[in-house]
Image (cartoon, coloured by chain):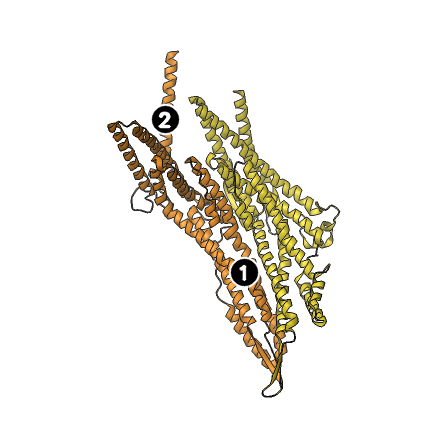
Amino acid sequence: MMENTVVTENTRKNLKFALLAALFILFLSPNMFATSSCDISSSFTPGQPGSWLFWSVAGIGISAIIASIIFMAGKVLEKPELMSRSKTDLTQIIATVVILVVFSSAVIFMCNIGTGSLGFKTNTTLFAAARGYFDYQYSLTAKEYADTANAIMSVSAFSSIYGGGGWGMVTISMSPFSGLATLLSSLQYIMNMVMLQISIAHAQRVILTVIESVFLTYLLPAGLVLRCFTPTRELGGILISLAVGLFLFYPLMFAMSYLITGENAPVGIPGSTWYNDVIRTGIVLVGEYILAGPLVSVVTNIATVLAIVNPQVVSSIFGLGKVMLVVFILPAIDWIIIAALIRDVSKIMGEEVDVSTLARLI
Amino acid sequence: MKNNVMKFLLIGFLILALAGISNAALATTTVNCPNAPSPCKFGMAMHETRQCTSSLLGMCIAETVNRCCIHDLLFNLANLVVLITFALVAIAYMIGRALENPKVLQWSETELTQVIGTAVILMVFMSLTAILDTTVGPTFYNQSVIFPADTYRTSSSYQQLHPYGGWATVQDHVQHYLESDLEGTLSSLIYGFSTLSAMVGAISSMSFSIQVSSSLSIFFTPFAATFGPIQSVLATVFNAVVISAAQLQIQLEIIKLNGAIFTILLPLGLIFRAFPFTRPAGGALISIAFGFTIMLPIAYLVTEDIALHLYGPGGRPSGDTLAGQITQIAFSVSSANEMQTFFTNGFAEGGVLRQMAKFLVIEVTLLPLMAYLMVLNITRNLAEIFGAHIDFSTLVRMI
């Protein structure tokens, strides 16, 4: 009976060890051998863009050495509280190693996901897909800007035309298209919105670049080192969850937005065409004025000018909806989810980070 | 022990049912899209996408590009992730039993419950989508649900406005309502207003100069006094039209994305829900997908019902009649020389300005705003049920 209990106990211990070893090898293998197609490399070589892993390992190693020195110092000086604190720190260093292994595996897995396997038309990385979304978003806002600018210039130019003619003592003069100026304030309102959207679109793209190049390289190693010591543990947890959370989920959510919007290529930005319209109409106006007189000229040209201006105005107004969807609405939904995900990740670290203020700021 | 076996059997059955239902739905449901030549499967329609033609254990192994159908790759991926989670949790449960570790056992039992929850959510969602297109939609198409006495839906003018009759999906119907009824009206209003502004501006800018002598000339603008104030009223109303048109476009774009939100956000939510640390975010995504694909179209059906009650089909203001009526009013103002006539005629019962204010304020702005508030409120509450606390305040403020 006694023998059986000992055997079961040994089996359980061996099984636990085997499980831990298997898990460790499983998590470590992608870090060591995977060749990543991601924008950041997974090599250990310092000085390269993907040296975050090297600095993270080095940081944890140095932290472990410092904690060990403190432990030894505590032992030599016979200070039990110092020994106890460094023991806690060493335990936390082991936990940090596990966090690094799990997160680096997740990061490398994330980098190796081909978007083709998620239903995208083109097989690329999630970062590239998110960049595709931002390119589309930016081109759409730029097109809306160009469309609205063209409409404003056309309306301004036409509404400023002033002419007249006389018969003997009587002179009649008028500004035949001045009524179009009533459209200007609405178009300027649209222009204000578009300018804001261009800034936001640019900010979202910059955030992706920063996340890609800075967060893992600087924030993660700093967070890991800070997490190893008691006084800075909370701050370290926050940095790790921000770095990893945003690195994993920001490109993912915006890549999904790209998929939702139909993976459109950036749209072409129209050139400035308003002066062609104004010059062409001006020539016709003068010609008609000479040949048929002022009244005929005014009536026929109001129709001509409206045929030029109306589609521009309508295109500018109706284009705003699509731009707002791509720049405001979908990113707002993405940020809601990203904030929830970062909060979830930060809970693993023992801290709850709320990035919704950052989202609101953007 | 018996209880556990029963639990596993139930879960296994649910998972199989889940994979089976989604694949069966893909294989059998055929829906005709009104705007696309090819038939569409799977309820929600979307143009220029892919369709799974052959699948194995939830994974799509062959797909074709279809002009109408949605792709099911992410759905299959979600099924697969749920199956993998189930397998992992089952392994964890076995390990827990082998090690006699109550913590592992408890964790795996909790996770198994969550897997069941995910399967149930997906099944409920699929059923609701089917009910939405096959039952809820046709109920609204044929009669007024809010005002049963109204017969507008069956009138010939309404049928003329909505020529497709039997709609493939509620989304198609709502999109047509927004595009044809509202966007069309607003577009005609913009054209009407710019024409009117140009005419009024041309007349009001007209000035006469009479050369009395070499040193004296008389200069006067006879129409500026009357048409000047009208022009400022036109500018104000045009601003309102522009704001309404812009926000209507946002509504329209959101509705156009409905199918994509369903096929992308829902599976993503299911995938997130499979992992403990991302479960609240998964719940948030599922609730957003639910709100935007189930509740929003229903809210628009209700909105349309109320609007039809207010106007009747074909009762919305039109840009052409607007230009004519306002010009008429303007000239009557000019002859009577009083601005009051303009407002009295314009805002009288059936007057063009009153009709337009009703359209812009109630149908294009207020009713959709209420619809969105309702949808966001339901979404937030649903997310809370799924364990996620999402802050929609930014989105609500934006809307």
Identity of the residue drawn at 59% across and 59% down: B242
User: For numbered disc 1, what is the local secondary structure?
Assistant: helix
Horizontal side of residue A57 vs B49, given as left or right: left
The amino acid sitting under disc 1 is Tyr
> Is B358 or B223 nearer to us in this picture?
B223
| Chain the render paints yellow | B
- Report the disc number at residue A18: 2
Image location of residue B161, percent across then percent down: 68, 55
> Is A169 or B167 nearer to us in this picture?
A169
Mark 1: give few (<14), some (14-19) or many (20+) Cα within 10 Å: few
User: Which is closer to the viewer, label 2 or label 1?
Assistant: 1
Q: Tell me, what hue is chain A?
A: orange
User: For numbered disc 2, what is the local secondary structure?
Assistant: helix
- What's the chain of the residue with tag 1? A
Mark 2: give few (<14), some (14-19) or many (20+) Cα within 10 Å: few
Image location of residue B80, percent across then percent down: 49, 36
Q: Looking at this rendering, what residue extends furthest in the top direction?
A: A1
In the image, is residue B201 above or below residue B319?
below
Indicate the quadrant where residue A295 lies. Answer: bottom right
Residue topped by disc 1: A189
Image location of residue A93, percent across then percent down: 34, 33
